[in-house]
Image: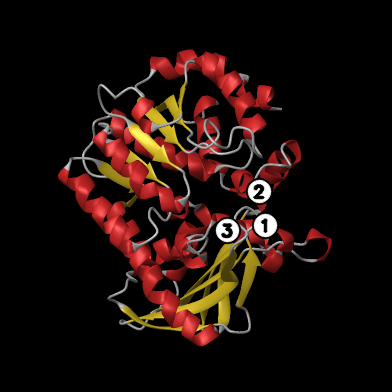
Amino acid sequence: MLSRTLARTAATTARRFASTTTPVALVGCGMPGRGMGWYHAKQILDGDVPSAKLTDIVEPWFLGGGADGPGGAEFAAFKAEVEPTGVRFHSSIADMPKPDGKMMAMVCTRTADMPGYVDDLVAHGVSHVFLEKPGAPTVEELGRMKDDAAAKGATIWMGFNKNVTKYVTKGREALAKVPGGDFTLVHHNAYKADELAECFERNAEGMLKNMAIHELALLVTFFGVNADTLGGVVADAAYSSCETRTGPSSGKEFTDFSRIGFTVTTTDGANVSVYADRCGLELPDGAMADGGMMYSSVSKLGIVQSRDIMPDAELEATVAARSAANPDWMPYFHLQHDDYITLKERCCAHVAAGSSGDPEGIATIQIGYDTLKLAETLKPMLEKQLL
């Protein structure tokens, strides 16, 4: 399967070199089929991101202590197939050759490790960093990273893919046609109940800083919601569920929301609701909860005026085909495949062209900072109502 995935690499090499490209280093590949870093690498290797050229992969875990553990063999097979195409593999950023010009590094590691890797990349001479959410465990750390990068002339963008998704764009357009309307964002993951322990352990920063951080970024970007403009929040106690699970690797207990729903009101009186469910697909016969993996809806006086779903009818057949071809991959890879390409292409094309400012629709680290601060502000307010 991996051979088929990478078979197009050689065929697309000439096309990639013929155009203006940005060298890309990936930090935190993860396990093939599971890791977000791996999927970013796969899309670049497959030629789906014409302005990107993958030059380096830094993978401290599978090239270190995790080599003989779960996923180690799969990563070794991936490395054996990719390395002959010219991609260099390293166990640390220090081992990677310093760039001799502009380079974009993608950081896809666990949240707790992100600040250290970003510091190392900037010190190594990397000009642009594409940082997966949430970027840091705390808003103080992300703020420090933001200021340090600016002082050293480095640019950091955040990987909030929903800023460019069609269902959000269409939903915002529908809201503009309903004066005084309320907006709702619904997000479903496909974890099974018996997978929550591993999920809670791996995403120890918690639901608001992990899964629901995408929706909070939309609130910050498009609705002017932040820690200063937040008028209040009302939790949906009937929907929300908080659980404690024992992490399979550490044996430690992790308490988090498996699902949460709430409505925020801005100081201007606007209402925006967020619903996030880790096990959103767990219905009889595999039915999809609420009719969509993700959707936005517009309502007024309690009556739904419109709803835009992802996947829509056009995308559903494509997602089904991708899922059938690679059923063991994370479901959101199939669902958000095109959005991941859009993010990388906009960033890499921007760097390659030497453009100033930021690419259209790409979240800056300031957006990331405001989003993380909003998450930290909401957490105690919601816990007070729900726990």
Upstream in sequence: badge 2 or badge 3: 3
Crowd class of label 1 (few under 14; some 14 to 19; many from 20; radius 10 Å): some
Point out the frontmost of discs 1 and 3. 3
Q: Position of residue 359 (x, y in %)?
A: 31, 43
Residue that numbered label 3 is attached to: 201
The CA span between labels 1 and 2 is 7 Å
Upstream in sequence: badge 1 or badge 3: 1
The image quarter containing residue 369 is bottom left
Residue that numbered label 1 is attached to: 190
Q: Secondary structure at mark 1?
A: loop
Residue that numbered label 2 is attached to: 331
Asked whether the viewer can see residue 309, the reply is no
Disc 3 marks a residue whose amino acid type is: Glu
> In the displayed structure, would residue 232 be above or below residue 197?
below
Disc 1 marks a residue whose amino acid type is: Ala
Q: Position of residue 62 (x, y in %)?
A: 55, 34
The image quarter containing residue 224 is bottom left
Q: How many marks?
A: 3
The CA span between labels 1 and 3 is 17 Å
Quadrant where the N terminus is found in the figure: top right
Q: Secondary structure at mark 3?
A: helix
Q: Is residue 193 left or right of residue 113?
A: right
Crowd class of label 3 (few under 14; some 14 to 19; many from 20; radius 10 Å): many
Is mark 1 in CB contact (under 8 Å) with mark 2?
yes
Is mark 2 in CB contact (under 8 Å) with mark 3?
no
Q: Position of residue 265 (x, y in %)?
A: 39, 81
Report the residue that reaches farthest toward the right: 285
Disc 2 marks a residue whose amino acid type is: Pro
Name the residue located 63 percent from the left edge and 54 percent from the top edge.
312
The image quarter containing residue 255 is bottom right
